[in-house]
Image: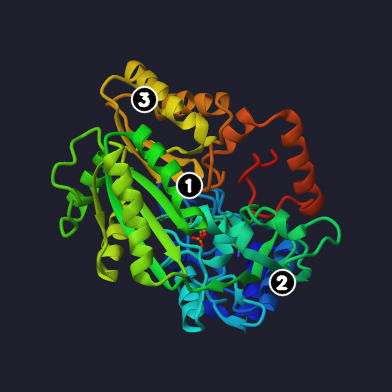
Amino acid sequence: MTPSALLAALAACLGEAHVLTGADAGPYLTDWRRNVTGRALAVLRPASRDEVAQCVRLCAAAGVALVPQGGNTGQVAAATPDASGTAVVLSLLRMNRVRALDLDNDTITVEAGCVLQAVQEAARRAGRLFPLSLGAQGSCTIGGNLATNAGGTQVLRYGNARELALGLEVVTPQGEIWDGLRGLRKDNTGYDLRDLYIGSEGTLGVITAAVLKLYPLPRAQGTALVALDGLPQALQLLQRARASLGAGLTAFEVMSAACLRDVTRAFPQQRMPFADLADGRWCALLELSDNLEPAQAQERLEAVLSAALEAGEAVDAAVAVSGAQSAAFWHLRESITLALARADACVKHDISLPASRIRAFVQSTDRALAQAFPGVAMRVFGHLGDGNLHYNLLPPAGARHADIQALVHDRVHAAGGSISAEQGIGQLRVHDLQRYKSEVELALMRRIKSALDPQGLMNPGKILAARP
Ligand code: FAD
């Protein structure tokens, strides 16, 4: 089938208005960080599972690759097509219905293009919590969250996106529909296909819907910002908060003073939380969620902070006294990615390490970077409670980003960590994956890919290098 015959068949299936070409396709072709711009034969906007399946079948028959896309907020250009202009982008944004809410089973069934925040709000209206939470929640989609196994700020208590999905509906690379929309908390009936598709970044099939777990809304929540002398003190505070608050500790985030300064510079309406937060200092953001009376929850949080101040672990602390203040604390944290996005040259690393190795890793790697790249400026923040740091930096003029990344990633690998804790591999970290995974692991991944997608048409060049 010629490209124009394919486009005509796709237009007959979706309607002309939902097969975008030329300038109309432009907004779908550049990644969020503006690192990569690709080209595409067209952008397809199906409105239903059956339309997705028809698009996939038509493309498979024509030998045309597909790049699934949700909110296009990913950090590794995984939803951006290559420069050949031969693939189509499959946008799921029109598939945004809540299909079912089962309060007796504490589940919600949603289509893949539902924006995360809309799912949180639907759950809240029903008196439940959908806990996945991240800075891009106003535009990222459930399909994208599952395809990247997104983490975010509540992993400490509720786990990654993987732990929040009970079932999936998927269109396979051949255009078959797998209805795995089961709301079961126990189901040991063979290989877990759900877990295979979660985190596969659109390389094994298109997720069209999911059954998600809901939780009771906590009766009380407390949020605190704590000023600290350094990262070692943040690790001590984490241990203390875990021991005292147990499962009530739903978030433990950290950010360096330099990151907070970038936020207040980029967004002057936001304020530094502590007047004397000198360079080199850090801030931790703690959240407690509990079923106690609100006043009791507040007391529990304050008791942890008082003990930390007395022990000299914390320099200063502020507990939010209203919902608005708590939102302002979170806004500071969640604005860091946006503030750093304005610094063109930022070199980003999304690493995780066992908690026991973080202190030594950061001390020795900060030192090694300063020696190898004099003038480097660190911009580190992240989900310390999960051992996940966005170990970012602003390099001195002339430094090669690839050399910096190799230094950091070699050390992460040597310390038994991961070079992509939550953002995935996409196209930006394909070479890293090849460098750090064993031959056996890579071969198993390639076999899975070729068993499920023998034509290699699902998001080629992402996770694994495209076939020549
Ligand atoms: P896209 O970017 O559109 O796609 C991402 C990948 O998923 C691509 O490989 C794409 O092909 C695939 N995909 C999308 N939809 C489907 C589908 N229906 N079926 C199959 N494959 C699909 N991530 C975290 O984990 N934690 C954070 O705290 C976090 N914070 C962020 C903060 C900001 C400000 C921003 C911009 C991003 C952040 N992210 C974070 C990145 C995060 O991965 C994405 O925001 C989100 O999970 C991706 O969803 P999306 O709908 O935008 O997917």
Could one spot residue 136 in this view of the protein? no
Q: Which mark is residue 243?
A: 1
Horizontally, residue 191 falls left or right of residue 200, namely right
Q: Secondary structure at mark 2?
A: helix
The image shows residue 360 at horizontal and vertical percentages of: 44, 25
Dot 3 corresponds to which residue? Answer: 366
Binning the other alpha carbons within 10 Å of mark 1 as few (below 14), some (14 to 19) or many (20 upward) gives few
Q: Amino acid at mark 3?
A: Asp
Residue in the foreground of this view, choosing between 223 and 375: 223
Q: CA distance from mark 2 to mark 1?
A: 50 Å
Q: Earlier in the sequence, mark 1 or mark 3?
A: 1
Question: In the rendered view, would you say 107 is above or below 384?
Answer: below
- The label nearer to you, 2 versus 1, is 1
Q: Amino acid at mark 2?
A: Ala
Horizontally, residue 440 falls left or right of residue 320, namely right
Q: Residue at x 70, y 64 (%)?
A: 59
Residue 148 in which image quadrant: bottom right
Q: CA distance from mark 1 to mark 3?
A: 29 Å
Q: Residue at x 31, y 24 (%)?
A: 398
Dot 2 corresponds to which residue? Answer: 53
Q: Amino acid at mark 1?
A: Ala
The image shows residue 281 at horizontal and vertical percentages of: 25, 36
Tell which residue pokes out farthest to the top in this image.
371
